[in-house]
Amino acid sequence: MELRIVIADNKAPRVLEAMCSHFGYQATINGTPNPVTEAQFAREQVKAWIREIVRTHEERAAVDTARATVAADVLTF
């Protein structure tokens, strides 16, 4: 599956600036230009956010399943 997010050209600079500011992009690191561009940084932040959502969802589902399993097992005592 491929997921694409389309941002209008006239809005892209605002989105990029906001994301870089929000997530702490640094144009220089220890006085050296950051090899990661702002666009690359923003893209990685979106991917990390999606990974976190999936992890949280699957973790909650696993906990719910474990609770249901234990509850059903306890009823058979």
Image (tube, helix red, strand yellow):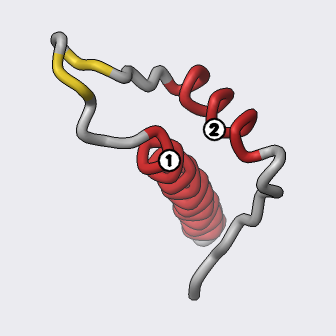
- Return the residue nearer the eye: 47 or 39: 39
Crowd around label 1: few <14 · some 14–19 · many ≥20 (10 Å) = some
Secondary structure found at label 2:
helix
Q: Would residue 63 be seen by someone viewing this image from the given angle?
A: no
Reading the chain from its start, which is encountered first: label 1 or label 2? 2
In which image quadrant can residue 65 be found?
Answer: bottom right
Q: Quadrant of residue 20?
A: top right
Q: Mark 1 and 2 residues: CB-CB less than 8 Å, in contact?
A: yes
Q: Position of residue 11 (x, y in %)?
A: 81, 44
- Mark 2 Cα shell of 10 Å, populated few (<14), some (14-19), many (≥20): some
Q: 57 and 27: which one is in front?
A: 27
Q: CA distance from mark 1 to mark 2?
A: 7 Å
For image coordinates 57% across by 68% down, the residue present is: 69
Q: Residue at x 27, y 30 (%)?
A: 34
Q: 14 and 48: which one is in front?
A: 14
Circle 1: residue type: Ala
Q: Identify residue for label 2.
A: 16
Question: Is 17 situated above or below 36?
Answer: above
Residue 42 visible in the shown view:
yes
Percent position of residue 13, x then y: 69, 38
Tell me, for residue 7, which label it has, or none: none
Instruction: Quarter of the image for the C terminus: give it.
Output: bottom right
Which residue position is annotated with label 1?
39
Seen at 55% across and 62% down, the residue is: 58
Residue at x 64%, y 76% (from the top left corner): 3
* Residue 22 position (above or below residue 30): below
Please name the amino acid that badge 2 sits on: Leu
52 relative to 65, above or below: above
